[in-house]
Image (tube, rainbow, N blue to C red):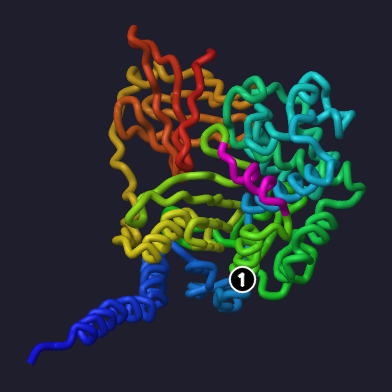
Amino acid sequence: MKTPFFCSLLVTSLLLQLPARAQAQSLPKQLDALAASYAKAGQFNGTVLVADHGKVVFTKGYGLANREWSQPNAADTKFRLGSLTKQFTSMLVMQLVEKGKLKLEAHITDYLPDYPKANGDKITIHHLLTHTSGIPNYTSQPNFEAASVLPTTPTAFLRTFSELPLEFEPGSSFHYSNSGYFLLGTIIEKVTGKTYTQVLTENILQPLHMQDTGYDLAENILPKRAAGYDKASTGVIYNTTYIDMTVPYAAGSLYSTVNDLYKWDQALYTTQLLSEAGKALLFKPFKSDYAYAWVASKAVVGKDTVALLGHSGHVNGFGTYLLRAPQDRRLVVVLDNEGGPHVKEVSMDLLRVLYHRPTTGPKPEPTAPKTIALDAAALVPYVGKYQLSPTFFITVKAQGSQLSAQATGQQPFALMATSPTRFTVQGIAAEVEFVKSTSGAVEKLILHQGGQDSPGAKVE
C-alpha cells in the first residue's frame, strides 16, 4: 500500500522537526559541558550567560566566588568588569553628543581648559574614544603599581599623564590607552556638573533596571561580590594584588553580573539609550577595527561569515568578555575571577555551539620553554638601553653568563635563554627577543607579553 502524499509530507515534517527539538533540548547541556571542561582544566572560574535570538538559554557559575568562605559563583555574583566599563563610558559620551553637550570633533581643551594646550588643542573626543589620541597608556607608566593602591580624584590623577609626550600624532595610529577613557570620564563630569557615577546611574543603570551594576569601591558593602585571584606559574591560586578603584575610573572601575549585562545587550537593540544613527556611529569601526569601545570582527562560525562585536576587560584578578552576534541577536558573557586569561577562547567556543560548529575545548597550557646556556661573550652585544616609548625603557645588563633586565620603575628580572636571540623572563609570562641588523649589530628588542609585541630601539 502506498503512503498518501500528504502523509509523506507530514512524516518528513516531523523528521525535520525532531532533530531541531532534540538539539534545542540539548543546547544547555552542550554549553554546560563545554564551560565545565574549561573549568576542569583550570582555565575558567566564574559565570557564563548565553542568549540565542534574544532569549537566555543558559547561565551558570563555575568554581568559587570566594575561596576563603567556599562561596560558589552564580548568576548573581558581582564581578569587576575591567575595560568593559569603556562601553558604558562611550555610551554616556554619545548620549551627551545627541543632547548637544559634547561634539566628537571638539578638542580636550574645549572642555578642560587647564589641560596642557600643546596636546589638548589637537586631540579630539573621537581620538579618545578610538585610542588614536597618542596619549601614553597610564597603566604602562613607571611606578604605576605604586600609584595604583592610592585613592585619587580624576583631576589629581589626570596630572600623572597629561604632560607626557605623545606617542604619535593624533589620528595617525592606534594604541590602546586607558588614559583616553579616563579623560572622557573627567569630561563627562565637567559638562554635566555631576560625578561619573551619578551620570552613569541616571542615564543607563536606572533606565535599564541594572540594580546589580555600579562603580566598585572597596569601602562599599557589596553583597555577592566576587573576590579576585591570580594563578602562579606553578598553578597555585593566590589573592590578587590590591588596586584602588578610583584609579581605573571611567576606563575600568565598574562591577556587574551576567544578568545585568544581558539587560545591557538587549537595550542596544532599542533606541531607549541612543538613536539608531547614534548607535550606527557607536559600532562603526575605525583604526584596528576599533569602534567606540567595541571591537568589530568577522568569524566563520556558521554557514556564513558572522559579524561580531565584542570587548574584553582585565583588572587585578578579573577577566571578562562580552561577545555579540547582532544579526542573530546572540550573546555570550564570560566573567572570571581568577585573572581570566582564557575568557576570549571560552566566549568564542560557546558561540560556536550556538552555530552548531565544532568547538576547540581547552587547549593544554604551554610548557615552559627549555633554556640553553650561552657563554658570556655571546651576551655582550645585548647589553644596553632600549626605548619602548618616550618614557619607558628596558636596561639590559650582563654578569658573567647571566643576563638581566630592568624596566623603568620596576625591579630587575632574570632573562633565561631559549635560543641565541630569545629569552624568557623568569617568573613572568613574557619573552624578550633581540633583533640584529644586516650588519649583525643588535638594533632593538621586542617584548612579547600578553599577546602584544612591543619593540624598543637600542638607544645606548
Q: Residue at x 10, y 88 (%)?
A: 2
- Horizontal side of 160 relative to 235 (left or right) equals right
Between 199 and 150, which is closer to the camera in this rendering?
199
> Could you say whether the residue bearing mark 1 is in a helix, strand or loop?
helix
Q: Residue at x 59, y 68 (%)?
A: 258
Q: Residue furthest left?
A: 1
Between 352 and 274, which is closer to the camera in this rendering?
274
Type of amino acid under label 1: Asn
Quarter of the figure with the N terminus: bottom left
Instruction: Determine whether 198 is above or below 174 in the image.
Output: below
Judge whether residue 48 can be spotted in this image.
no
Judge whether residue 26 can be spotted in this image.
yes
Q: Residue at x 46, y 61 (%)?
A: 236
The region drawn magenta spans 274-285
The image quadrant that residue 459 belongs to is: top right
Q: Position of residue 314 (x, y in %)?
A: 58, 51
Q: Position of residue 411 (x, y in %)?
A: 58, 36
Q: Position of residue 250 (x, y in %)?
A: 73, 48
Q: Residue at x 42, y 20 (%)?
A: 382
Q: Residues within 10 Å of mark 1 (few under 14, many from 20)?
A: many
Instruction: Determine whether 215 is above or below 20 in the image.
Output: above
Q: Position of residue 24 (x, y in %)?
A: 38, 77
Between 52 and 222, which is closer to the camera in this rendering?
52
Task: List the residue tagged with mark 1.
Answer: 259
Q: Residue furthest top?
A: 439
Numbered disc total: 1
Q: Residue furthest right?
A: 193
The stretch drawn in magenta includes residue 263: no
- Horizontal side of 355 relative to 56 (left or right) equals left
